[in-house]
Structure formats: C-alpha cells, structure tokens
Image (cartoon, rainbow, N blue to C red):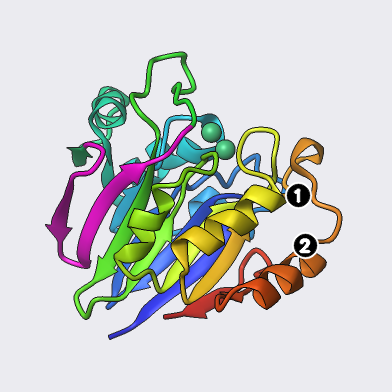
Amino acid sequence: MTFKVTWLGHAAFSLEMNGVKILIDPFLNGNPKASVSADEVDADYIVLTHGHGDHVGDTVAIARRTGATTISNVEISQWLARQGVKKVKGLNTGGGGNFDFGSAELTIAFHSSTLPDGTYGGMPNGVILTSKDGKKFYHAGDTSLFSDMKLIGEKGIDLAVLPIGGWYTMGPDDGARAIEFIKPKVAVPIHYNTFPVIGIDDPGAWAKSVGKKTDTKVLLLKPGESYEL
Ligand code: NI
Ligand code: MN
C-alpha cells in the first residue's frame, strides 16, 4: 500500500493513501511558502484541524471544484455546509471514523478556533490518519505542548508533523519535548518561517539536536517535498 505525504508549506499537506487523495489544512493562495496554488490541487477528502484562516485556507473553493468530502469537527463542518460545501463529515474530539482510505481520528490540541468570518469553530484538533495496513500519521494542528501527547504516542506514530514556529503554537524547545513525548519514527516540523513572527533561525541545527536526543528521525522537508511511509 502506498502512503505518500507531501508538505505543501505552513501546515498544509497532500496525502496519497492507496490512491485516495487527502488534503490537510489547504492554506495555499496567500501562503507565501505554498508549493502549489489552490486551483492546481486535487482532493477526495479535505481534513481540517481548526478554523483559523491559515488552515481553512482554500477549503471551500477546492471542495466546490473537486467535490471533495471534508472531515473536521462538527462546528466547522456546519460552517462549511453553509458556505456551499456539499459533502461534510463532522466528528468531534476523541472520535473518529472509517473512510475508504483507512480511518481518521480527531485528537485534542490546545489552541483556539475562530473561522474567517468570526464564527466560533469549536475545539481545535489534531488528527491521526491510519492507513488500512496500520501506518499512522499524526498532524498536531496548532497547539501548545501537552503531556497527553504521550497517550497519542502510545498508539505508535510512524510520522508526526508538528508546529515549532512559536508565537501562536509551540516553539522549537517545546516542539522538541513533544517529539520526546510522542516518540514517532519520523517527525517533520511545520508552521515555521511562513511569516516573520514564526521565524526560526536555524531549523537544521534544531533537527540535528533533537535527532541526537531521541530515537526519532527528524526530517526537514521543503515545501513540495514528500516522505513515503
Ligand atoms: Ni491557529
Ligand atoms: Mn496556524
């Protein structure tokens, strides 16, 4: 089975799970680091971690064009339906469901969540996507460090992507502690250097020091680059 994960910049990913195309947090147009524009991507599903503009991004336009099904919490799914998105799946924290690519589970994340028009977006989430052959991808969303990341790690995470840019989320130090809690096989830092306020001086040095402290392979991707699970 194929499970290919491509970073599109910031918190946006494109996944291919056994032929099914999944976008996560597709903030592409207006994202200075995006590797593709919103009209170039294809999707069967769009997964959203929370309602902020740098995550919801181009979801409505992409869903309308592709007919993709969205997966998010209930509040965001209701908002998307009101924007004209036809197929929405509204889950909630700690819940999950089976889909034709495998399964999706919404985890906790400590952050806030307001949709672009000011509507309350419910609780922010992370998401675990599991392929039919059991490979687990964890997108932490926007979050602070929390000790229950250990519980997420106990599920056996193959690839974790997590924010390290600071200001709105964990910075590099707490990002390193998160990796110690989760113990994924591979970790990819995201949500840094998109804007000056979330700038990181030397991500390479950070990756090296975390890699030395843990058994996790810390991988720096450039927007557009992929990792195959
Ligand atoms: Ni946010
Ligand atoms: Mn964000």
Residue segment shown in magenta: 92-110
Location of residue 171 by image quarter: top right
Q: Which of marks 1 and 2 precedes in the sequence? A: 1
Circles 2 and 1: CB distance less than 8 Å? Answer: yes
Across and down, in percent, residue 168 comes to: 63, 33
Residue at image coords 79%, 69%: 204
Q: Quadrant of ligand 2?
A: top right
The residue lying furthest to the top in this view is 118
Magenta stretch encompasses residue 105: yes
Q: Amino acid at mark 1?
A: Asn
Membership of 37 in magenta stretch? no
- Badge 1: residue crowd in 10 Å (few <14, some 14–19, many ≥20): some
Q: Across the whole image, how many numbered discs are drawn on residues?
A: 2
| Residue wearing tag 2 | 203
Numbered disc 2: secondary structure: helix
Residue 184 x, y percent position in the rendering: 46, 70
Residue 208's place in the image compared with 180, above or below, is below
At label 2, the amino acid type is Pro
Is 75 situated above or below 108? above
Which residue is found at the position 80% from the left and 46% from the top? 199
Residue lying at the far bottom in this picture: please name it.
1
CA–CA distance in space, label 2 to label 1: 9 Å
Would the CB of label 1 be found within 8 Å of ligand 2?
no
Q: Residue at x 16, y 60 (%)?
A: 99
Q: Secondary structure at mark 1?
A: loop
Answer with the quarter of the image where residue 82 lies. Answer: top left
- The residue indicated by pointer 1 is 193
